[in-house]
Image (spheres, helix red, strand yellow):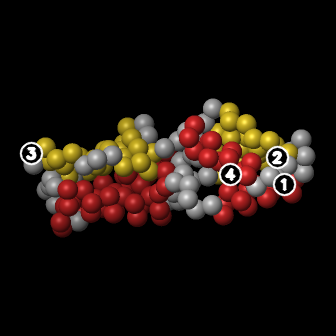
């Protein structure tokens, strides 16, 4: 029976490269000279540090540009609150990996509402879609690509005939 998996993953190697490029650009920009502004990456969590909230926004603009140029979808980022303490402002940005239970339920509901002849199964942080016909599976992919209200980047992998 043909099937495919719907996943949401960001390439953490590309994220690390974008963080390195951002830090390199911050060290050469005039408005960030000797401010100690930087972005650090630990696992899938980035921490932006700068002297003020305004500079955090500028720093994030540079980071988003670098991520987009490296092919990382910006929907995968989950921004925390800006915390200002004394002469320092920090913000955490989490790179979301996988489809959480709430988004998986919304995806399953969307597929079921279209009454396509496919079965869906949540397997951990991904969604398996299987059906008898390849055309039905391609219709599901087209349906999910057409939806813009999901705040997750979706990829379609392991298409098996």
Tell me if residue 16 can be seen: no
Q: Earlier in the sequence, mark 2 or mark 1?
A: 2
Q: Nearer the viewer, residue 84 or 65?
A: 84
Q: Earlier in the sequence, mark 2 or mark 3?
A: 3
Quadrant position of residue 57: bottom left
Q: Which mark is residue 86?
A: 3
Q: Which type of secondary structure does the marked residue at label 1 adopt?
A: helix
Q: Residue furthest left?
A: 86
Q: Which residue is mark 1?
A: 136
- Asked if the residue at tag 4 contacts the one at tag 2, i.e. Cβ–Cβ closer than 8 Å, the answer is no
Q: Which residue is mark 4?
A: 110
Nearer to us of marks 4 and 3 is 4
Q: Is residue 92 left or right of residue 7?
A: left
- Asked if the residue at tag 3 contacts the one at tag 2, i.e. Cβ–Cβ closer than 8 Å, the answer is no
Q: Earlier in the sequence, mark 3 or mark 1?
A: 3
Q: For the residues marked 2 and 3, what is the alpha-carbon distance in whole angstroms?
A: 56 Å
Q: Which type of secondary structure does the marked residue at label 2 adopt?
A: strand
Q: Which type of secondary structure does the marked residue at label 4 adopt?
A: helix
Q: Which mark is residue 160?
A: none
């Amino acid at each position: 029976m043909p099937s495919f998996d719907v996943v949401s993953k960001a390439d953490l190697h590309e994220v690390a490269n974008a963080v390195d490029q951002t830090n390199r650009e911050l060290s050469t920009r005039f408005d960030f000279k000797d401010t100690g502004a930087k972005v650090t990456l630990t696992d899938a969590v980035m921490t932006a540090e700068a002297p003020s909230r305004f500079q955090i926004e500028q720093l994030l603009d540079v980071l988003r540009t670098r991520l987009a140029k490296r092919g990382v979808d910006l929907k995968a980022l989950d921004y925390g609150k800006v915390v200002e303490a004394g002469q320092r402002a920090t913000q955490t940005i989490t790179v979301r990996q996988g489809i959480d239970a709430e988004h998986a339920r919304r995806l399953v509901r969307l597929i079921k509402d279209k009454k396509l002849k496919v079965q869906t199964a949540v397997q951990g942080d991904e969604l398996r879609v299987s059906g008898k016909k390849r055309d039905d599976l391609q219709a599901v992919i087209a349906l999910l690509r057409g939806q813009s209200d999901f705040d997750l980047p979706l990829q379609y992998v392991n298409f098996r005939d």
